[in-house]
Amino acid sequence: MLVELTELIHTLATSDGEQDESDSHPARLYKVYRLATVAEHTKLKALAKEILTDWDAVVACFYHAQLPPTNNEAERALRHAVIARRISELAHQKKV
């Protein structure tokens, strides 16, 4: 399963953004997660089921090239606010 996921991620990262509905990547990815739902490892099984529950969101980047495959940009945009909140919490704790 890890090999298949690694290959799919590499393919996405190196693609030119041109994907169409006949692309087999989502089907391959779906098959990997379906197999994981019967895995012996409890956490792997739970993760696979959670991903399949949100399947449409997971594969949206395959069908809409303008969508990024990760939320890294959004995470980076929030980073400064999170750091500021943490500093504020620590300052408040020192006062108490």
Image (cartoon, grey):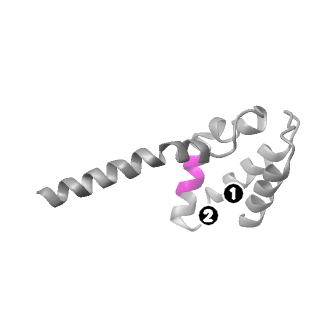
- Residue 51 is left or right of residue 24, and the answer is left
The image shows residue 78, relative to residue 95, as above or below, that is: above
Q: Name the residue under label 1.
A: 35
Q: Residue at x 39, y 52 (%)?
A: 83
93 or 30, which is in the foreground? 93
Q: Residue at x 57, y 62 (%)?
A: 44
The three-letter code of the residue at mark 1 reads: Leu
The three-letter code of the residue at mark 2 reads: Ala
Q: Which residue is drawn at 65% across and 35% down?
A: 56
Q: Which numbered marker is on residue 39?
A: 2
The image shows residue 23, relative to residue 37, as above or below, that is: above
What is the crowding at mark 1: few (fewer than 14 residues within 10 Å), some, or many (at least 20)?
few
Q: Which residue is drawn at 87% across and 40% down?
A: 23
Tell me which segment is drawn in magenta.
46-51
Magenta region's main secondary structure? helix
Task: Indicate the secondary structure of the residue bearing disc 1.
Answer: helix
- Residue 8 is left or right of residue 35, and the answer is right
Residue 90, image x, y percentages: 25, 58
The image shows residue 54, relative to residue 39, as above or below, that is: above
Q: Distance between the residues labelled 1 and 2?
A: 7 Å
The mark total stands at 2
Q: Tags 1 and 2 in contact by the CB under 8 Å rule?
A: yes
